[in-house]
Amino acid sequence: MASERFEHYVQVLYNSISHLLSGDLDNRIDVILKIIRECEEEGVCDKYVVSRMLRLADVLERYVREQVAREVLLDTLREEIAGGPLRDLAILILREICDEEVAESLRDWAEDPNPDLRLAYLKCVSKLFDEGMVSLDQLRIFRDDPSPKVREALVTSLSKSASRDDVFSFLAGMLGIEKRSSIRTKILMALSKGDRRKRSRGGGILERLRRAMGGRG
């Protein structure tokens, strides 16, 4: 399977699914099936992947038509995220449908042994944080997650808000405990960008870091 071509089809498929979830039902399901057929005809998607795509498309269509409960869709997404070939697509869809009710029903994912499920839950909750629907405290559990990719995703999700005092302090605290150099670099980059957006505070990034970390250093 050609990775770049497969990723292309995943993105195109997600774009159509996003329209489907927005209510463009009859026309959009035809587009989704056409994309799946093209992926198979080009030899990018094998029969197993095509069967998973068709299954996901079927569940999505029935969900939009209110023929199945949201729990059915969430169970299908969980299966893909936990080890299916459509992991990345399923995470994108989960983030698309994420609201406070979804996040609450998936709370146990935050401590699931599978890091991909923790990552998916993080992306859901970080979306709600961006929308002002949850507090920063609900992201705190991920600061010392055992998976580097989960911690890195946390930094990425918060980097655009690093000029906010609470987020700056959160990332500064994470810097104090993070051991992996690549993630520490991402934290420092986020803090630096956040500091440049908030020059009115004065003192520069080193002074802000000193204050955020309780005067240490």
Image: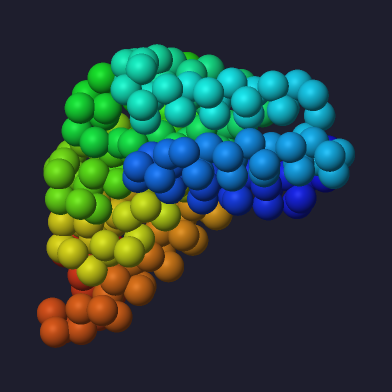
136 up-or-down from 72: above or below:
below
Viewer-proximal residue, 168 or 19?
19
The x, y position of residue 94, in whole percent, is: 40, 34
- Name the side, left or right, on which 125 lies relative to 100: right
> What colouring method underlies this structural image?
rainbow
Q: Is residue 216 visible?
A: no
Q: Residue at x 19, y 45 (%)?
A: 136
Q: At x 46% / y 60%, what residue is drawn? A: 186
In this picture, residue 45 sits left or right of residue 189:
right
The answer to whether 36 appears left or right of 208 in the picture is right
Which image quarter: residue 65? top left
| Whether residue 135 is visible | yes
Residue 45 is situated, as x and y percent measured from the top left of the image, at: 78, 35
Q: Residue at x 67, y 43 (%)?
A: 35
Q: Give 82 or 93, whichever is nearer the viewer.
A: 93
Residue sitting at 20 percent across and 78 percent down? 198
Q: Say which of 57 and 137 sits in front.
A: 57
Tell me where residue 210 appears, x and y as whole percent.
22, 65
- Percent across and percent down for residue 87 are 58, 31
Q: Is residue 207 above or below residue 59?
A: below
Q: Quadrant of residue 126?
A: top left
